[in-house]
Image (cartoon, rainbow, N blue to C red):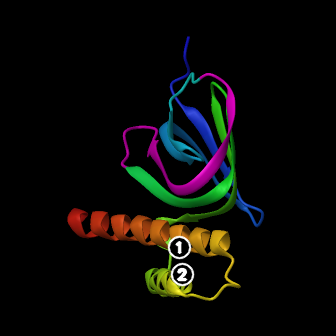
Amino acid sequence: MLPDAIELVIVTPEKQLLREKVVEVQLPGENGYLGVLPGHAPLITELGIGELRYHHLGGKESAHLAVVQGFAEVLADRLTVLAETAERAEEIDLQRAKDALARAEKRLASNDPNIDWDRANVALQRALIRIQVATKQRSALVAGS
């Protein structure tokens, strides 16, 4: 029989960010998004940069996190995410993310031959996903008021 929920564990080098029972997770794989439900086949995947979304047990609304690279291990009853960075929507400083986006765009538009293009592109993607996640959270709070 399939489990009703899976335990979602999200860990960064600094801390364990989350450990709770959920009924569905969507996470950014290196080559696209992956959906995980209870009873999913075991796998290990590399994470990309994107939004991790999950639905709470008991029908509570979904939560959103910004995730930047790492790995995920999926088992039938547990999903462990080892992320380079992961932030809850409410922890994101929107102005700081917008400032980082402006810096990344300026760096990528530069003609400086010494620019690390890969690093600048990751900074751009990270800023964009942080803005997306924070904006969704704020919009949901306003709509729920």
Question: Mark 2 falls on what kind of element?
Answer: helix
Question: Mark 1 falls on what kind of element?
Answer: helix
Q: Where, by quadrant of the figure, is residue 110 drawn?
A: bottom right
> Can you tell which mark lies on residue 67?
none
User: Which residue in the protein does label 2 denote?
Assistant: 104
User: How many residues crowd around disc 1 within 10 Å: few (fewer than 14), some, or many (20 or more)?
Assistant: many
Which quadrant of the figure contains the C terminus?
Answer: bottom left
Residue 11 placement (x, y as % from top left) = 71, 55
The image shows residue 126, relative to residue 63, as above or below, that is below
Residue 53 magenta-drawn?
A: yes
Residue 97 placement (x, y as % from top left) = 49, 80
Circle count = 2
Return the disc, 2 or 1, that comes first in the chain's sequence.
Answer: 2
Marks 2 & 1, CB-CB < 8 Å contact:
yes
**Boundaries of the magenta span:** 41-61
> Residue at point 57% right, 24% down?
40
> Residue at point 37% right, 39% down?
59
Which quadrant of the figure contains the N terminus?
Answer: top right
User: Which residue in the protein does label 1 denote?
Assistant: 124
